[in-house]
Image: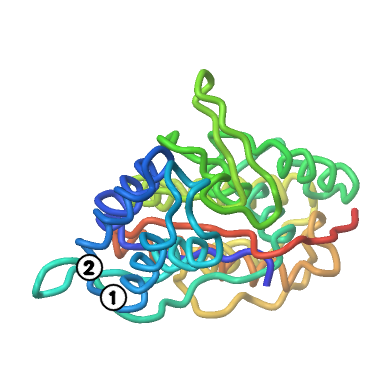
């Protein structure tokens, strides 16, 4: 597993996670104490207490790393909900998307970037490599998969934790990216509203490339990507940009868009994490 994408409670992220991480940059002890008062989850409380006890002052430089990473992972990747007695609790494990980071970025760029040369293995690989080093803003799901933050956070996300050592935080340009990223529910809902148009645009590009042959499965592929049918159709004409792997990539894009669709329906945010280094070839 190299990329994880999961829906998260939007209110919890706005009210607890983001303020906690922002304050922790300058006063991690006070941030941990404030968070401790808001949580009901036993393991998170244990981690907060340990970090407070072992704290040596200041911002994140004063916290013990192993329990800090476990706490942040618990806050950002588990499903939280309000407790009936007050505070927040973990409401159970939540399935999400897990797959190859390079392939997920390839599929996301196909959907989001009308200039992405997905049919050219070398050119598309070069674009992805550049994107990983400096994710381009304004490309929806692709920007999130690349680790770009929007809206701009009040803290450097790569300082919270890092799995690959990627990260940049430029205040004057309002630009930030890291090995993990988040989008609020309002952004996810807009992505979902625009999804059908973008998928139709991708299919139109393929029809132009296949001309004068008309791929008879286009409508069925679109229906699968939009969740209107449970399985993709068998292909009689391979998409030129997908070649021999056309069927598997069509299915994988359907899986990816299903998680976007589900998050939008639940009014949830989305968080991504690159879990380990990848070695991709053009």
Q: Residue furthest left?
A: 85
Q: Which mark is residue 41?
A: 1
Secondary structure, mark 2, is strand
Which residue is denoted by mark 2 in the rendering? Answer: 88
Left or right of residue 15: residue 199? right
- Image quadrant where one finds the N terminus: bottom right
The answer to whether 182 is drawn above or below residue 261 in the figure is above
Quadrant position of residue 107: bottom right
Neighbours of disc 1 within 10 Å: few (<14), some (14-19), many (20+): some
Residue 28, percent from left and from top: 38, 48
Nearest the eye: 19 or 80:
19
Which type of secondary structure does the marked residue at label 1 adopt? loop
Q: Position of residue 32 (x, y in %)?
A: 33, 55
Residue depicted at 40% across the width and 71% down the height: 78
- Residues marked 2 and 1 touching at CB (< 8 Å): yes
Q: Is residue 183 above or below residue 68?
A: above
Between disc 2 and disc 1, whose residue precedes? 1
Categorize mark 2 by other alpha carbons within 10 Å: few (<14), some (14-19), many (20+): some
Measuring 57% from the left and 59% from the top, which residue is drawn there? 273
Q: Is residue 231 left or right of residue 182?
A: right
Q: Is residue 225 left or right of residue 268?
A: right
Q: Which residue is found at the position 68% from the left and 53% from the top?
A: 105
Q: Indicate how the structure is coloured in the image.
A: rainbow
- Which x, y percent locates residue 265? 32, 63
Mark 2 against mark 1, which lies toward the viewer?
A: 1
CA gap, disc 2 and disc 1: 7 Å
Percent x, y for residue 18? 35, 47
Q: Residue at position x 48%, y 61% from top?
A: 68
Of residues 96 and 239, the one nearer the viewer is 96
């Amino acid at each position: 597993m190299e990329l994880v994408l999961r829906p998260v409670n939007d209110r919890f992220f706005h009210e607890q996670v983001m303020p906690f991480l922002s304050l922790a940059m300058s006063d991690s002890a006070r941030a941990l104490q404030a968070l401790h008062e808001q949580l009901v989850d036993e393991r998170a409380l244990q981690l907060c207490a340990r970090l407070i006890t072992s704290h040596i002052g200041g911002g994140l430089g004063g916290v013990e790393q192993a329990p800090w990473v476990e706490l942040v992972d618990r806050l950002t990747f588990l499903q939280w909900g309000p407790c009936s007695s007050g505070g927040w609790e973990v409401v159970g494990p939540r399935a999400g998307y897990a797959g190859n980071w390079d392939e997920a970025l390839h599929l996301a760029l196909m959907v989001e970037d009308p200039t992405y040369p997905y049919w050219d293995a070398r050119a598309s690989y070069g674009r992805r490599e550049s994107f990983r080093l400096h994710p381009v803003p304004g490309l929806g799901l692709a920007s999130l998969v690349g680790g770009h933050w929007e809206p701009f956070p009040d803290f450097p996300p790569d300082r919270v934790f890092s799995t690959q050592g990627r990260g940049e935080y430029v205040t004057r340009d309002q630009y930030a990216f890291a090995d993990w990223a988040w989008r609020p529910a309002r952004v996810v809902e807009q992505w979902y509203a625009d999804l059908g148009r973008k998928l139709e645009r991708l299919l139109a590009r393929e029809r132009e490339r296949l001309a004068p042959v008309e791929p008879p499965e286009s409508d069925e592929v679109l229906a699968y990507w939009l969740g209107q049918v449970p399985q993709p159709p068998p292909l009689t004409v391979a998409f030129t940009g997908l070649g021999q792997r056309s069927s598997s990539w069509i299915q994988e894009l359907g899986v990816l868009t299903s998680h976007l669709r589900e998050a939008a329906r639940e009014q949830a945010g989305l968080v991504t994490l690159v879990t380990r280094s990848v070695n991709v070839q053009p």
